[in-house]
Amino acid sequence: MKIVVIGGSGLIGSKLVNKLREDGHEAVAASPNSGVNTLTGEGLAEALKGASVVVDVSNSPSWEDAAVMNFFETSTRNLLAAEAAAGVGHHVALSVVGTERLLESGYFRAKIAQENLIKASSIPYSIVRATQFYEFVKGIADLSTKDNEIHLPPALIQPMAADDVASAVGRIAVGPPVNGIVEVGGPEQFRLDELIRHGLASRKDPRKVVSDPQARYYGIKLTERELVPEKSASLGTIRFDEWLAKSA
Ligand SMILES: NC(=O)c1ccc[n+]([C@@H]2O[C@H](COP(=O)([O-])OP(=O)(O)OC[C@H]3O[C@@H](n4cnc5c(N)ncnc54)[C@H](OP(=O)(O)O)[C@@H]3O)[C@@H](O)[C@H]2O)c1
């Protein structure tokens, strides 16, 4: 089956392309690096020729409010129109668990806009909402560092390995469209401050992590369960300590 992976050069996309190829599919990595740009439409029609499924795991280069909204709206519109013209039968997109609870952030307002365009289109679809990736632990720490101290709220989080995300997206991409949202999460829950403290300690990063209920996460006020998936979510198997040991 020909499966086009938009954002196929990215963190999730590159893992997904490899997994699909291992399973015998014709997986095509499509992104500006390979001449396919969903913002301008360049190379899209050619890439989608003969494709049964399109998986969108692209991300906006800028997370500034207007730029990220423009990215997800324009690229999703262009992609869905090209899929309709090419007769693609399944659009799969990667989104984020809790998106509708995180709308204080322009990034998540753009992800909801992306989801709504997909729901309103005529293409059968599956939206996969994943929790935060382990790979972003250092990025969250860096973003929240002030005077060498990191303040984060003790909200619950159920992060997962990018490898498990790619496996889940791949499983859904080769199955029938669910025409709805599927949630995937990690095997364990943490407190956000505890997760970052543990991740930094394992890298011998000396920054102090302070549990601070008033601190913000990507500019968002969290209380308790905004970042955790529903009980029905399917869970990855790679534990944080296992991932830390492997990525050391
Ligand atoms: N971070 C999290 O914890 C988390 C959790 C759940 C879901 N997600 C979602 O996961 C998705 C993938 O994230 P990621 O971290 O794997 O992304 P990433 O590593 O930043 O990769 C982004 C990809 O998007 C491509 N891209 C950028 N502009 C494009 C354009 N105009 N046309 C086509 N492709 C374009 C890039 O291509 P080039 O390399 O060619 O520039 C790259 O392949 C995102 O949609 C994000 O919302 C993230």
Image (cartoon, rainbow, N blue to C red):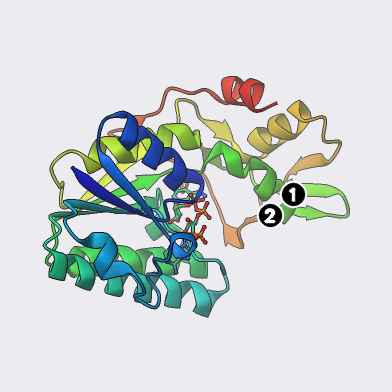
In x, y percent, where is residue 63?
56, 68
Residue named by callout 1:
151
What secondary structure is found at the residue carrying circle 2? loop
Q: CA distance from mark 2 to mark 1?
A: 6 Å
Disc sitting over residue 80 in the figure? none
Quadrant location of the N terminus? top left
Q: Amino acid at mark 1?
A: His
Rendered view: 115 above or below 227: below
Mark 2 residue CB less than 8 A from any atom of ligand 1 = no
Tag 2: amino acid: Ala
In this rendering, position of residue 191 left or right of residue 147: left
Q: Residue at x 42, y 56 (%)?
A: 7
Asked if residue 214 can be seen in this view, the reply is yes
Q: Dividing the picture into quarters, in which one does residue 183 lie?
A: top left
- Which quarter of the figure has residue 44? bottom left
Residue receiving disc 2: 215
* Residue 232, image x, y percentages: 27, 34
> At x 40% / y 28%, what residue is drawn?
236
Vertical arrangement, residue 95 with respect to residue 112, above or below? above
Tally the numbered discs.
Answer: 2
Residue 185 appearing in the image: no
